[in-house]
């Protein structure tokens, strides 16, 4: 038996006791946020009041998904660039001279950096990281945190990168350093009744003889019987050392405050406003439904025979028996003036405006702008709020993805002796203990290509930008290869123009 329920409260099962009340409540809140993203919002628990003789409109316009998807698209619609810059060993002044030749040490450093960059691009290309980043960005905005996990696929000899939602993760941090993970547990129920669950645990422990930390991995499935006792169902991986002195997992939080382990959910910020908008739109729909059709009022009419309502219909109105003198059968239409239209629309407009302000996602309709054209600067001003939000988000993504890249290189080095290891061992063996790398992001803004080229040309002529940097900003897929192509053509043209060239 894995857990003992002897000390557990009668309404808490052993698996729940292990998670703890705080974690259970957190996971429940996160699952509710995902339900909101799926459209289960203000009307989720609605029950029709007794005595209501019509079915009210329950309209849900999923602004939560729209805003989350928009934020994720701004962050990763354009693929990030992975770069490893070599350390500068030679004199920088000599390096910019025309006849510069790298020293042996500088050449070795350049080769190491190129090997690291090639390996990182290899792993990210295989793992479709760009596609996964768009998905992970949505999870991060919904729950407030998303997790990146690295593991080695022994069947294929590949390093895999997977992003996991926060409701699957229970983490424990160091008391002195809240950024240092000491335990990370992935937990998921495998059946609808919650009687079979899977748990994968990573723990970082100090090993005395090794004089270093060691990451241990345990993975198993457990079954809960009718007495709520937990039994081992299948041991997949017994507790074993991974040969790593770090936990190969990276937490990627959303915006948060000092001392917080998880980030704030974006959906929590605007949920009351989107609920109010959907309520008012539903009320507005019912109002239009009832007010747009006139009510037929029949007076002094025997209605037992029925009346047809259709274009061109004729009614033969007959009065009921016992009419007083002077009373005649009559039919009238009661029309509505619908006087509250302007008030409702003004209220909804204010709600929409506040929603976009809180989300920092502008609502821009360029068709309504009375201008002849929009240049790059005008576009950036229109989208300044979401550009600022995206760049703030990139601060977190940059540090976490660079840490992820470091873990990938360190994991590769630890698995390079595996018989099925598919990566170039010479490249992996050339990796040193310097894992510095840089992640570059780009905004998905429409740019004036001619203006961008002119600006880059000015920066290069003023020694403010390199050719490689300019190629990267232009969106060239492989700026290093393009740079070598340019330099080769320059040498060829120079040799052709030299009359003394042998």
Image (tube, rainbow, N blue to C red):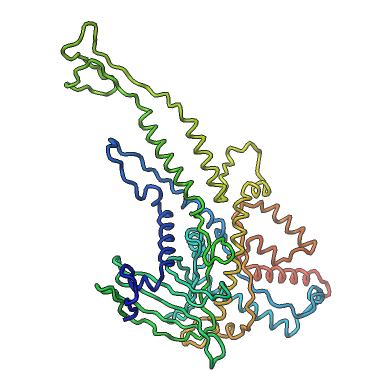
20 is higher (above) or lower (below) than 473: below
User: Which residue is depicted at the point 54% across and 91% down?
Assistant: 210
In front: 177, or 158?
A: 177
Pick out the residue farthest to the right.
500
Left or right for 233, reference 87: left
Quarter of image, res 192? bottom left
Pick out the residue farthest to the top.
325
User: Which residue is depicted at the point 63% across and 50% down?
Assistant: 384
Query: The C terminus appears in which quarter of the rendering?
Result: bottom right
Counting from the top left corner in percent of width and height, residue 75 is at 56, 59
Tag count: 0
Left or right for 497, reference 119: right
Counting from the top left corner in percent of width and height, residue 66 is at 48, 51
106 is higher (above) or lower (below) than 367: below
Left or right for 30, reference 226: right
In front: 436, or 464?
A: 436
In front: 373, or 203?
A: 203
231 is higher (above) or lower (below) than 368: below
Counting from the top left corner in percent of width and height, residue 2 is at 34, 80
Quarter of image, res 30? bottom left
User: Which residue is depicted at the point 39% across and 85% down?
Assistant: 238
């Amino acid at each position: 038996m894995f857990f003992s329920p002897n000390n557990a409260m009668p309404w808490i099962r052993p698996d729940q006791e292990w998670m703890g009340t705080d974690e259970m409540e957190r996971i429940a809140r996160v699952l509710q946020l995902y339900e909101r993203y799926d459209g289960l919002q203000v009307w989720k628990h609605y029950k029709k009041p007794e005595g209501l003789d019509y079915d009210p409109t329950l309209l849900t316009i999923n602004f939560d998904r729209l805003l989350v998807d928009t934020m994720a698209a701004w962050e990763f619609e354009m693929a990030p660039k992975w770069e490893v810059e070599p350390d500068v060993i030679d004199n920088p002044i000599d390096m910019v001279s025309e006849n510069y030749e790298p020293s042996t040490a500088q050449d070795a450093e350049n080769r190491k950096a190129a090997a690291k960059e090639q390996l990182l691009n290899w792993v990210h290309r295989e793992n479709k990281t760009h596609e996964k980043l768009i998905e992970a960005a949505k999870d991060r905005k919904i729950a407030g945190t998303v997790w990146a996990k690295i593991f080695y696929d022994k069947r294929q000899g590949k390093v895999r990168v997977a992003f996991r939602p926060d409701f699957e993760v229970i983490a424990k941090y160091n008391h002195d350093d809240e950024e240092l993970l000491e335990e990370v547990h992935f937990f998921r129920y495998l059946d609808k009744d919650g009687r079979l669950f899977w748990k994968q645990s990573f723990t970082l422990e100090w090993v005395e003889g090794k004089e270093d930390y060691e990451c241990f991995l345990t993975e198993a499935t457990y079954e809960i019987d009718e007495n709520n006792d937990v039994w081992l169902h299948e041991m997949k991986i017994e507790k074993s050392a991974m040969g790593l002195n770090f936990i190969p997992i990276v937490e990627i939080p959303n915006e948060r405050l000092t001392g917080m382990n998880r980030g704030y959910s974006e959906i929590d910020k605007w949920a009351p406003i989107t609920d109010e908008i959907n309520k008012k739109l539903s009320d507005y729909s019912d109002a239009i439904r009832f007010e747009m059709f006139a009510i037929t009022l029949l007076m002094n009419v025997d209605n037992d025979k029925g009346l047809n309502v259709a274009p061109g219909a004729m009614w033969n109105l007959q009065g009921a028996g016992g009419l007083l003198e002077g009373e005649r059968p009559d039919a009238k239409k009661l029309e509505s003036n619908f006087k509250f239209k302007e008030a409702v629309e003004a209220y909804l407009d204010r709600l929409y405006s506040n929603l976009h302000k809180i989300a920092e996602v502008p609502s821009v309709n360029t068709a309504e702008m009375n201008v002849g054209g929009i240049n790059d600067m005008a576009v950036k001003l229109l989208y300044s709020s979401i550009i600022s939000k995206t760049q703030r988000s990139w601060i977190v993504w940059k540090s976490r993805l660079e840490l992820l890249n470091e873990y990938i290189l360190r994991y590769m080095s630890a698995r390079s002796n595996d018989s099925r290891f598919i990566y170039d061992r010479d490249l992996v063996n050339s990796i040193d203990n310097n894992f510095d790398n840089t992640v570059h992001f780009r905004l998905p803004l429409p740019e004036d290509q001619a203006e961008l080229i002119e600006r880059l040309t000015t920066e290069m002529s003023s020694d403010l930008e390199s050719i490689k940097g300019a190629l990267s900003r232009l969106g060239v897929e492989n700026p290093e290869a393009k740079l070598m192509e340019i330099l080769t053509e320059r040498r060829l043209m120079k040799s052709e123009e030299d009359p003394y060239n042998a």
